[in-house]
Image (spheres, rainbow, N blue to C red):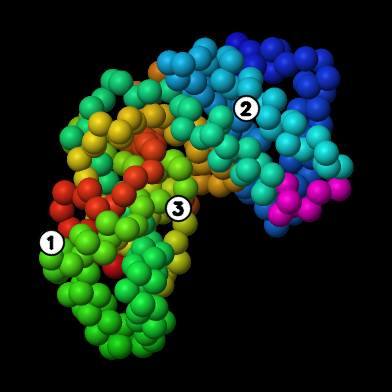
Amino acid sequence: MSLFETALQALSDEERKQFEEWERAAREVSRSAFKDAARTVVDNIRFEEHFYDRDSSRLEKFTTFLRKLVQSYSTFPVKGLTAEKFRDLYNTVCRDNESCLHGELIEAVNPKMLFRYVPMNGLLGSIAKMIDDDDIINRRRKDDVRRKNNFDLYQKRIFAEWKAYGREILAKASLANRKAVFVTFPDADGRIPDESIGAVILMRRLGYFMTQTDSIVKLAYEPQDEDILKFPTVADAGWYPYFKPAEEGDLHGWTEPIGDPTTKGYPEAVHRNRNIGLLVKRPRIIE
């Protein structure tokens, strides 16, 4: 039996009934504006195979997740929940310490370098608040000429002077705004994300939906002792439709390319969030 089927059998009769009610309600939500995400969330829970670590059996850990999921909705009339409330409750369970970052340890690969690609406006927005310069974010959204000028200004102020200035500023920022940091790394053939295809297409191949107006920043760093790589699980992904759990036998997770099912994804892992100041080289901006 699959991990899901085994965990479902480990629930009590009442808990199993409640989970089945939750699943039916989730599929009802799938007819709303959240249809793609809701349907994917339900399917991914059934496909999950790597939700455990050395501190517990995989059955115990995943059963606990299903039980907490049911309990979080127990005080609400599940069938009457709005799609937004349904999503928020699910994310609350996923980001709990008992759920997040509890995927199986990745031991078959040992990458020497990790890569994280983040939307530029999000990262620069956090930096701008630190240096009291939020207006530059708005100025970047003007016409192409002014956008290019401000792009160059930010490169000069933050990235070109990385050792003297940028590192000190970014030392106050984190790699992500959540506990689990999604990263990629070279696959068995040495293949890494092709940055020449542009920010939007690259991010979609990494399973991150972006618009044509965004730029991204590449963060490259060597794994530290605290960067214990784990399989990404449904709890790490939360209410996100562009994620697919690794299959049984996979050596690590894989990104889920958006819009092109024939495109091969890139290796994917998660580790605990930490400070950006530990980067080994200055960030690279990709447009």
Amino acid type at image mark 2 = Phe
Amino acid type at image mark 3 = Asn
Number of on-image labels: 3
- In front of the other: 174 or 12: 174
Amino acid type at image mark 1 = Lys
Residue in the image at 64% along x and 16% along y: 7
Asked if residue 83 lies in the magenta stretch, the reply is yes
Q: Position of residue 91 (x, y in %)?
A: 61, 44
- In front of the other: 106 or 171: 171
Query: Quadrant of the image for the N terminus?
Result: top right
Residue in the image at 62% along x and 27% along y: 65
Evaluate if marks 2 and 1 touch, with contact meaning CB atoms under 8 Å apart: no
Does residue 225 appear left or right of residue 236 in this picture? left
Residue 99, by quadrant, is: top right
**Residue identifier under label 3:** 177
Please give the label number shown on residue 270: none
Please give the label number shown on residue 65: 2
* Sequence order check, earlier mark of 2 and 1: 2
* SS at mark 3 in the image: loop
Q: Residues within 10 Å of mark 3 (few under 14, many from 20)?
A: few
* Sequence order check, earlier mark of 2 and 3: 2
- Examine the residues drawn in magenta and state their main secondary structure: helix
Q: Is residue 49 visible?
A: yes
* SS at mark 1 in the image: helix
* SS at mark 2 in the image: helix
Mark 2 to mark 3 CA distance (whole Å): 22 Å
Please give the label number shown on residue 163: 1
Q: Position of residue 155 (x, y in %)?
A: 21, 72
Magenta residues (range): 79-86
